[in-house]
Amino acid sequence: MASPEHPQKVKITLNDEIVWCDPNAYIIDIARNNNIYIPHFCYHERLERTANCRLCVVEIEIGGKKRIMTSCNLKPQEGMIVNTHTPKVLEARRVNIELLLANHDLNCPTCAKNLHCKLQRYSGELIVKETPFTGKRRNVPVDESSPSIRRDNNKCILCGRCIKMCGDVQTVNAIQQQFRGFETLVSCAFNEGLGESSCVNCGQCVIACPTGALTERSDIPHVIDALNDPHKIVIAQTAPSIRATLGECFGMNPGTNVTGKMVAALKKLGFEKVFDTDLAADITIVEEASEFIKRLNANENLPMITTCCPAWIKFGEQFFYDELSHMSTCRSPQAIMASLIKTYYAEKADLDPQRIVLVDIMPCTAKKFEILRPEFAGEADYVLTTVELGKLIKEMNIDFEHLEPARFDNPLGESTGAGAIFGHTGGVMEAALRTVADWLENKNFKHIDYQAIRGMETLKEATVHIDGMEINLAVVHTLGEARKLMEQIRSGTCKYHFIEIMACYGGCIGGGGQPAPTERFDEVLKKRVQALITEDLHKEIRKSHKNPAVNKLYDEYLGDIGGERAHKLLHTSYQRREFK
Amino acid sequence: MPADVNDLKLVESILKKYSRKEDTVAALQELQQTFGYLERGHLELLAKQLSLPLVHITGVATFYTQFKFTPKGTYHISICRGTACHVKNSETLLKHVERKLNIKAGEITTDKKISLECVNCIGACAKAPAMMINEKVYGNLDEKKIDMIIHSLE
Ligand code: SF4
Ligand code: SF4
Ligand code: FES
């Protein structure tokens, strides 16, 4: 019965303590909120609860009857007694793990997920000493066809999280269970490689995978070779979101901003220059703002959609090739920086561009695909994800925590608060609005915090009034949400003028190359966002068009914003992409 | 005789009958009945017809053992992998045939003449190891005997 102090709540006994809880919550989450962790594989905060792994079992007593039940899909009932760690429960979980280990490629020390794998973690926690079940082990080829993602099905425990992520959240549907029984595999149609499939390389499946079955395709060996080649000059650029997440690779709290240490670590690794992608983000904004104003005045190709996200671009080229005219022609900050380093910087520093090896430090597995686009040939050489950079720093035994902070190099190291917020959902739109408003009204606005497009909702809408115009905005993240908007555009019912799309939940701070939060997913992502918002607030200059380094670049080299040279170096084009 | 897989009109007339997700298995069955196996291009068309991702169609199709993905050759060899044959080393025989024809079980030679598959017990345990070519059973096999039989096909 609900009590007066707890209306609409039910009372349960959780490990001998009385807990009032929301009848629509689930036991696994209720327990976590009471500081009790229940091991799980298939459950993920953001995915449909399929309850297929049965690791989350607990002992339930209701009406005098005791039962073992899965807690991830179990709602509380008045008077329910829940025990999460009885000997019976522990034994059930242990047997579950033992069965999984019996058909697992147990090469933990050489696995990309070593020390970050849930199967490994739970085996340790449950003190599994041996695997009494011996039998045939799966032995299938590793899929290395994708430039972004490596899939080793011998490590897959068939929890199905990647399938839900790719299908339900991203609506890409590149992967699904194929075959049956012992032969069951998560794979693409006709068991072909991810690289030939409709996969957009977003890496959200990598973040979701509890084991080493899905990992980033590593470019660390190539980078080490380049760093040791005396004929090469190795340069790094770091994307806006890396500084807000890299610390987590070293056990720091989510949301710790490690800009200075990150630059210092890169210098220690042997990078000759470390440039800031934030500056390129500022350039993206001035180009995109000017493009948007042109389209707005001509009432042409609206809504305009941002194009910083390579997973979204591939998605658009595959599924909405009839609507590509809506995409901004502006390159992503990564691609802008790459083109400037191999042209402007090479000239300025009197270097042969052939000798420069550019390594992009990105939050993103899809960037590994982006740099291979033929339009960008010869620009960036390698992409390392945040996770890979963390591994590289560890491989070189650099004491990250105790590094003295260092600064980005000039002339491509100066940036604004607008560049900083590119790393989270809504940031690109907010940065663009700051410039669009100033330019259209010829003013220097003081109130530049666009709260309505901040936050973690996957669709955020706002209407702003600039220069007598009513401009409708939408910010979406996750490709499922993007698909809905694109269908509106296709059917002619879209009311927006300007749209920001990011493939990953949360934007780049939730990218497929970021350290995967092991739990409290949303909370971790929010802290990362906050790190960037704080950085923006503390910047002296918070508008892209006020960045002196950017203005100098246009004066010295690029010419007019949206001009001929700018077009050649800072813009691109898109085409229909066939897929299976 | 199975119908010609390139007869797109025929494919269309079959697919037309199906429109819902629940029709997947029925549509697959009719395609296989008509063409003898599931042709890749047909599955792509079926995915469009049912508005389902292709990977769902192949997921269903590979789940059921009744569905085949390669056509049968003029001669279809079924190597028995039942217990009796297994004990008599049918595995080695299979490897031998695979090497000889340069195809794997489930595949067909490039000239479309011979196809190969493994089957569960064909009921010829007394003559293990055994195989079938089309409807005919061959027993007490060894590598030499198999070579002769295959040569006689060519
Ligand atoms: S990278 Fe993205 S699109 Fe590709 S399989 Fe994973 S979730 Fe699907
Ligand atoms: S690849 Fe990873 S996420 Fe996907 S089913 Fe296997 S273990 Fe689960
Ligand atoms: S986590 Fe509950 S059944 Fe998998």
Image (tube, helix red, strand yellow):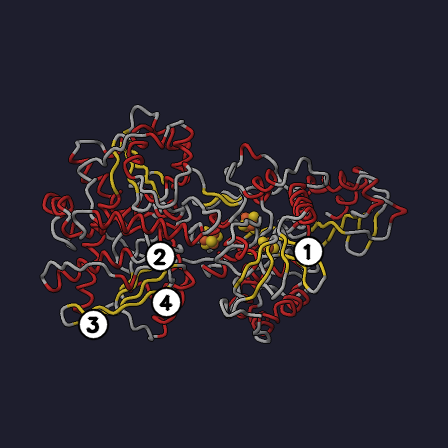
Q: Residue B105 appears at what percent x and percent y?
A: 69, 47
A460 and A89: which is toward the camera = A89
Horizontal side of residue B150 vs A236, given as left or right = right
Q: Residue A177 appears at what percent x and percent y?
A: 59, 55
Q: Which of marks 4 and 2 precedes in the sequence?
A: 4
User: Label 2 vs label 4: CA separation?
Assistant: 13 Å
Q: Residue B91 appears at what percent x and percent y?
A: 76, 41
Name the quarter where the N terminus of chain B is drawn. bottom right
What chain does mark 4 sit on?
A
User: Label 3 vs label 1: CA separation?
Assistant: 58 Å
Are dots 3 and 1 in contact, CB under 8 Å? no
Q: Which residue position holds label 4?
A: A486
What chain does mark 3 sit on?
A
Q: What residue type is labelled 1?
A: Ile
What chain does mark 2 sit on?
A
B128 and A124: which is toward the camera = A124
Q: Residue A33 appears at what percent x and percent y?
A: 50, 54
Q: Do labels 3 and 2 share a chain?
A: yes
Q: Which residue position holds label 3?
A: A470
Q: What residue type is labelled 3?
A: Glu
